[in-house]
Image (cartoon, rainbow, N blue to C red):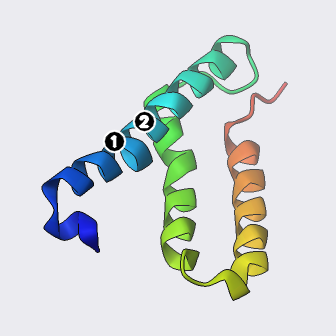
Amino acid sequence: MEQYTNPQIYTMFRKIFLEDAISYQEQLFQEMMEQGVFCPGDARATAISFYSPIYLLLSMYSNQPEHMEEALEILDKQVEEFYRIYRKKD
């Protein structure tokens, strides 16, 4: 909640949880594309496709530790589906 009332907190939140996370993953997926692990494409769009559901799960379950197992099951399925879609098929 503090991010909505404090511009400095919002800037820090945005940098850590959005900009830096997407930037790191963009570099990772670009390298995976160059090495032929993933299909060629837009690495930034791929990073956003990967991170968006993770961010959503973090938002949904952040204050619900009793549902951690459920969140991890959803995350596991999401990662498997992401890999199925983006991996390079021989």
| Crowd around label 2: few <14 · some 14–19 · many ≥20 (10 Å) | few
Q: Residue furthest bottom?
A: 66
Residue visible at 50% across and 66% down? 56
The kind of residue on which mark 2 rests is Asp
SS for callout 2: helix
Do the residues under discs 2 and 1 have CB atoms within 8 angstroms? yes
Residue 20 circle label: 2
Above or below 1: residue 34: above
SS for callout 1: helix
Q: Give left or right: position of 20 versus 26.
A: left
| Crowd around label 1: few <14 · some 14–19 · many ≥20 (10 Å) | few
Q: Residue furthest right?
A: 90
Residue 72 placement (x, y as % from top left): 75, 68
Above or below 56: residue 21: above
Q: Residue furthest top?
A: 34
Residue 26 placement (x, y as % from top left): 50, 28
Residue visible at 53% across and 49% down? 51
Residue 15 circle label: 1
Between 90 and 36, which is closer to the camera in this rendering? Answer: 36
Quarter of the rendering occupied by the N terminus: bottom left
| Of callouts 2 and 1, the N-terminal one | 1
Above or below 20: residue 29: above
